[in-house]
Amino acid sequence: MAAIDGRDGRVTAPGSVEQPGSTDSHIHNEDVASAFDEMADLLDIQGENPFRIRAYRRAAQIVRGLPQELARMHGTEEFDALPGIGADLARKIAELLRTGRLRALDKLRLRVPQGVRQLLKLPSLGPVRVRALFTALKIRGPDDLRRALSEGRVEKLRGFGPTIRAQLTQALAETPQSPRIPWSVAKQYAEPLKRFLESIPGVSRVEIAGSYRRGRDTVGDLDVLVCAARGTPLIAALTRYPELRELTAGGETKVSGKLRNGLQVDIRVVSSESFGSALHYFTGSRDHNIHVRRRAQDRGYKLSEYGLFRGRRRIAGATEEDLFEALGLPWIAPELREDRGEIEAAAGRRLPRLIELKDLRGDLHVHTKASDGVDPLKKMVSAAQARGLSYIAITDHSKHVGVTHGLDAERLARQADEIDALNATLKGFTVLKGAEVDILDDGKLALADAVLRRLDVVVIAVHSQFGLSQARQTERILRALDRPNVSILAHPFGRLLGERAPYELDFERVLKGIRERGCCLEINAQPLRLDLDDVHAKAARDQGVLIAISSDAHSADQLAFLENGVRQARRAWLTRDDVLNTRPLEALRAALRRER
DNA sequence: GCCGTTTTCGGCCCGACTGTTTTCAGTCG
């Protein structure tokens, strides 16, 4: 996801800034995280101390999850208190913020060519095999590897049997993944760009439209709408925007360019009387627009980005509201504009009242440092209180997944005691006892029914064996759902945006199974998960299955991820009533109680 | 490289799985 561009030693994550000689480096959290990830990869390929490597990876993860910019945090107590960032990494962050580069990384890059790192992304290739390819065969990237494979040189290497060679050949033949970036990454570039444009004299309004405004999980480019007085020197101003790599087109009303990370930016300048129709037009989606335009045509209008016209007379277009109204429709939330029935629903006054962040009363999937989180129970609780929630479920991992330092029955019981004691001291807030229990290969759970009985919320999830056939994966999950006490199936597809495809699942059957058993599905709000996706979440809603919007927070700051989940839920047409954790505590408990 | 009401040094997560082996290394989560 995060690309490092060029070999000039500067650190540039997607869309970041390079400003040679500048003291104001505009380094984003993602830049720092990418630099640490690259450090980890390069150290890994060199066979360095695994704990040192892990420290870099952990730091990257922590930085990536921060809700505010390091540049603003640096020097504060909050910064000093960041877990996983010790004296050395704090120094490195300071160096990055100050200079935009990291000397330690520069040194490593001299020893390992850029392409070698890319090899780590291929299946079955970890640091050891990559090192073997690099040192024994002088393979410096995917192209070298492709050649070596076809020439039969790889088979001489230890650890590269026929299966792995076939896997590699296939992976190298596949087209590179689409350049869409996760919404949360796009936000890091969209919001500063918006602020920059707003600061230009003569500009009265700026909106980021497109799939960003629709809240899609990934964003392909930024469509920006600028309302400005005639003659505003927009292009001149833009050439001073440090994040812009190049301008590819620049006219009176349209400016296109690319950011440092290659992200395409299209800026349109419109007048205020056209702003609404332009906003609608550039928000899309394309299918939605076609449908609305057809509706306009049926009524004898012509709809374009400049407005709604009858003949040459403008009927509407200053705002989206008046545009919709002129077409006999209530305003449709951008998240719904996919032509998935929203226009018909609007015409019939059947649009859902979409859920909002403030509707959430709790979070039902939260980790602590007891497993793989970074913050202790009490800190998670006070953070949840500060967010105005009235309950959270502590759902640390069960023991099965090694990396998560999961809890066995004994530790889980101790945690439950701790929670009982804590609850006795809390007013107006409740900590629910829970666990994220692994679904084993055969559909059994990693904790016994008797152990789960004491819990308020049992979240179950697949963390292994992603490659099972659809039939076996589905059976496995259905079998797990048969266990009593199970409440929620977490991240049902196991996807990671840009990294891992969803596993094969007969969703219809899972949905039916969930409904029959009185269980719920999760929208996991981690920015790279967003799983369920909008389509499947809507399907669940349509079947009357309750959805939990869960942060899956691994630190106190990550409770903020709930916002991602709400955005996804809105795209799935979810109302407050469709979501489990909008319920007050007693209603929640009732909803969790399963008929058996 | 981080971290500490057991430690400022010596720990740091580890089991499952897969493919490649001839008893196990590497990857994955």
Image (cartoon, coloured by chain):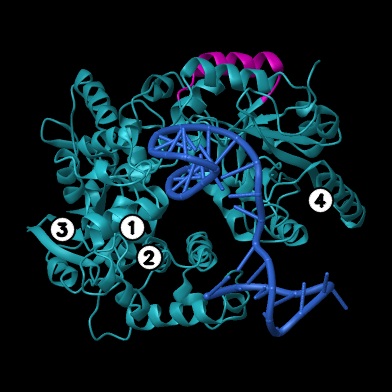
Front label number (4 vs 1): 1
Q: Is residue A334 left or right of residue A377?
A: left
Specify the segment rendered in magenta.
A504-519
The residue labelled by disc 1 is: A131
Relative to the observer, which residue lies in front, A207 or A364?
A: A364
The residue labelled by disc 3 is: A257
Chain drawn in blue:
B
Q: Is residue A336 left or right of residue A403?
A: left
Which kind of residue does numbered mark 3 sit on? Gly
The residue labelled by disc 4 is: A429
Q: Position of residue A539 (x, y in %)?
A: 50, 21
Please tell me whether residue A508 belongs to the stretch shown in magenta: yes
Which kind of residue does numbered mark 1 sit on? Arg
Q: Mark 4 vs mark 3: which is more N-terminal?
A: 3
> Which chain's residue wears label 2?
A
Q: Mark 4 vs mark 1: which is more N-terminal?
A: 1
The residue labelled by disc 2 is: A46
Chain drawn in cyan:
A
Do the CB atoms of the residues marked 1 and 2 lie less than 8 Å apart?
A: yes
Q: Residues within 10 Å of mark 3 (few under 14, many from 20)?
A: some
Relative to the observer, which residue lies in front, A61 or A420?
A: A61
